[in-house]
Image (tube, coloured by chain):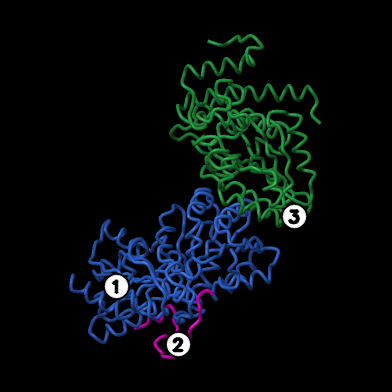
Chain colours: A green, B blue
Amino acid sequence: MLNDQKIEELEKTANVIRQDIIEMLLEAGSGHTAGPLGMADIFTLLYFHRLTHDSKNPDWDERDRLVLSNGHICPVQYATMARAGYFPVEELKTLRKLHSRLQGHPHREYLPGVEVSSGPLGSGLGQAVGMALGMRMNSGRGDVPYVYALMSDGEMNCGVIWEAAMLAGREKLQNLIGVIDRNGIQIDGYTWDVMPLEPLKSKWESFGWHVIEVDGHNFAALDEAVGEAQSVNDKPSVLIAHTIPGKGVPEFERDFHWHGKPPNAEEGAQALKELRTLGKRIECHDCD
Amino acid sequence: MLNKKVKLNTEVFSNTVEQIPLRNGFGEGLVEAADTDENVVGLCADLTDSTRMQAFAEKYPDRFVQMGVAEQDLAVVASGLAAVGKIPFITSYAMFSPGRNWEQIRTTICYNDRPVKIVGSHAGVSVGPDGGTHQAIEDMAIMRIIPRMQVIAPCDTHEAQRATQAIAQTKSPTYMRLTREKTPVMTTEATDFEIGKAYEMWRSENPQVVIIGCGPLLYHALRAAKQLEKDGVGTVVLNSHTIKPLDDEAIVSLAKEIGAIISVEEHQAAGGLGGAIAELLAQGSPVPMEYVGVKDKFGQSGTPEELIELYELDAAAIIVAAKKVLSRK
């Protein structure tokens, strides 16, 4: 269980990561805003509490694998990795630039610690299934690392997701934990308008998965959900994490137009002010 | 005459030449590769017997994954297995893998640099009665264009067996195409196989045309070479079993020596072996070329023999192409 002090610490880290995201996008001049802000809490919980990993030894065999399927939200992964010690925070400013290790969509060969190159949607879950299967073949059904597959709700439109879900269910991959960013938006609009997904929970259950619906911004609830997923030992688990796209910046929240564009200078300054004042609840010392 | 150095089947011109599907050689080679390396795993999309993965699946059930009819997942799961140290072989019909799952192969296997071996069986028009939907004749083109991908088209069961063992040992993503039908055995167990190394199967005394082929159509190439020799046209028949990396040195050297080339493949004339040769030679050693391949058409139902003849891929078509290219020298 997370104590209050740890929760506060995680909240502060997530806030810093959100500021990093805004600053990176301002510098890059292109990229995705809503998804990265919405997933900052989940990335923070995983990298700063739940994952077994070593930022100084990214190829360590015993590490848990975090597979980011919807690669377009990589600013949140980059910012989290930098804050977790994988590379200098200063390097975040190179996002999307020539010869940068921080490619517009992540490339595993460019940046150690990125498990898979991703971008085209739908392919992360199957790769996570392959990793989970392979590690089980290597070690029997004993103690194997967890494989986390982070997906978007929009990519639930992809057939290959369900191909992989079917296989993971049949194989009862208990070391596989999916996390769906259920933020309700995709490029063309709200998910319920573009391609309705509900009932999403029973879809996953019918494929043989243990499903946990959770508030994607509540650290205590999220941590409990990950713990529950880890304790299920006869099937894979998936968290349907209800998140707010653009979380932390009221002007961006829940608006699908922020899926694939960066803030301009003015919007960015406003966003940083919101984040640094925790929504005007505290004074900002370095705004403007 | 046949190149004695490479120890070909001396009965190749006999009417009773032994005929075996090359997918059989793949099946045997896979078991041998798996015996040698415990990291070799096999995945199949509901065609285990027909792609000859069955023997492996029976011997190593814990290393076999039945994927169901899910070719996109076939590619991505293999990528994940390779990420944790496995050497995955994935099989289906070439039309479905790599036909259906091209983007997954590009992104999760090649862009990710994972050593997955994609084995597409039932390639070419010789699948026959199943018709055009099942006749993959674009597969080599769509695979060879992807960075890092090796492309191999063995000519018979022995070569398929040796190629399977060889690709299991490389770190490169690889596509290997197989065909369905029984086809003549041209090589022997003693014939060497090296990825990227083409070899001469036939050389007349005064060669005027080079026939560069891959796959079982090399049998037609050899028969054409024999007939052409009788007609007074000397040839070299080069087995270019590796389409990528192409054996640049051997091909450029033959182009310079002989000065006329025809390519032979059970594939679209565009984009495959012939295309690769033309790209190479245009850069420094251009010579007249003719292409024996399917000319921008889809296949259809028929017997393998009927289709090979209809699409002008047989010995007769090779002879016509050889005479045509000779006239352009």
Confirm whether the magenta stretch covers residue A240.
no
The chain holding disc 1 is: B
Residues at badges 3 and 2 in contact (C-beta under 8 Å)? no
Residue ID for mark 2:
B17
Q: Is residue A195 above or below residue A281?
A: below
**Magenta region:** B1-23
x, y (%) of residue B244?
Answer: 42, 61
Q: Give the residue type at disc 3.
A: Ser
* Disc nearest the viewer among 2 and 1: 2
Q: Do the residues at pointers 1 and 3 share their chain?
A: no
The quadrant in which the C terminus of chain B is found is bottom left
Q: Are marks 3 and 2 on the same chain?
A: no
Q: Read off the chain for label 3.
A: A
For disc 3, the marked residue is A139
Residue that mark 1 sits on: B210
| Residue type at tag 1 | Val
Image mark for residue B20: none
> Callout 1 environment at 10 Å: few (<14), some (14 to 19), or many (20+)?
many
